[in-house]
Amino acid sequence: MLEKTEVIKSSIGLGTVLAVTISWSLNKSIFWAIFHGLCGWLYIIYYAIGNPNNDNLDE
């Protein structure tokens, strides 16, 4: 069974990976990818809720 600390560490890691991936796909900038990776879940929530262009990933 997973301990609470293991679940927290894995969710922080997942948030970082998702944030870096989304940031890189949109900006193609290492600086922004690192910055958004540090923000983690905050950037993912912003992207999901606050970004009006999040449906236009194919452009």
Image (tube, rainbow, N blue to C red):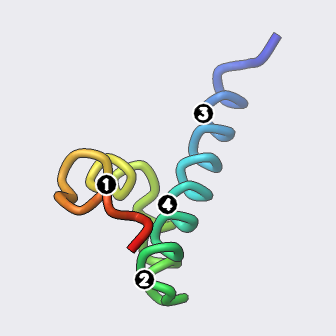
Residue closest to the eye, 2 or 24? 24
Q: Earlier in the sequence, mark 1 or mark 4?
A: 4
Which mark is on residue 19? 4
User: The N terminus appears in which quarter of the rendering?
Assistant: top right
Residue at which label 2 appears: 27
Residue at which label 3 appears: 8
The Cα–Cα distance between marks 2 and 3, rounded to whole angstroms, is: 28 Å
The Cα–Cα distance between marks 1 and 4, rounded to whole angstroms, is: 17 Å
Q: Position of residue 30 (x, y in %)?
A: 54, 88
Disc 2 on helix, strand or loop? helix
Residue type indicated by callout 3: Ile
Q: Earlier in the sequence, mark 3 or mark 1?
A: 3
Q: Closer to us: mark 4 or mark 2?
A: 2
Q: Closer to us: mark 1 or mark 4?
A: 1
- Whether residue 25 sits left or right of residue 43 in the image: it is right
Q: Earlier in the sequence, mark 2 or mark 3?
A: 3
Residue type indicated by callout 2: Asn
Disc 4 on helix, strand or loop? helix
Residue at which label 1 appears: 55
Q: Residue at 62% of width from left, 58% of height from top?
A: 17
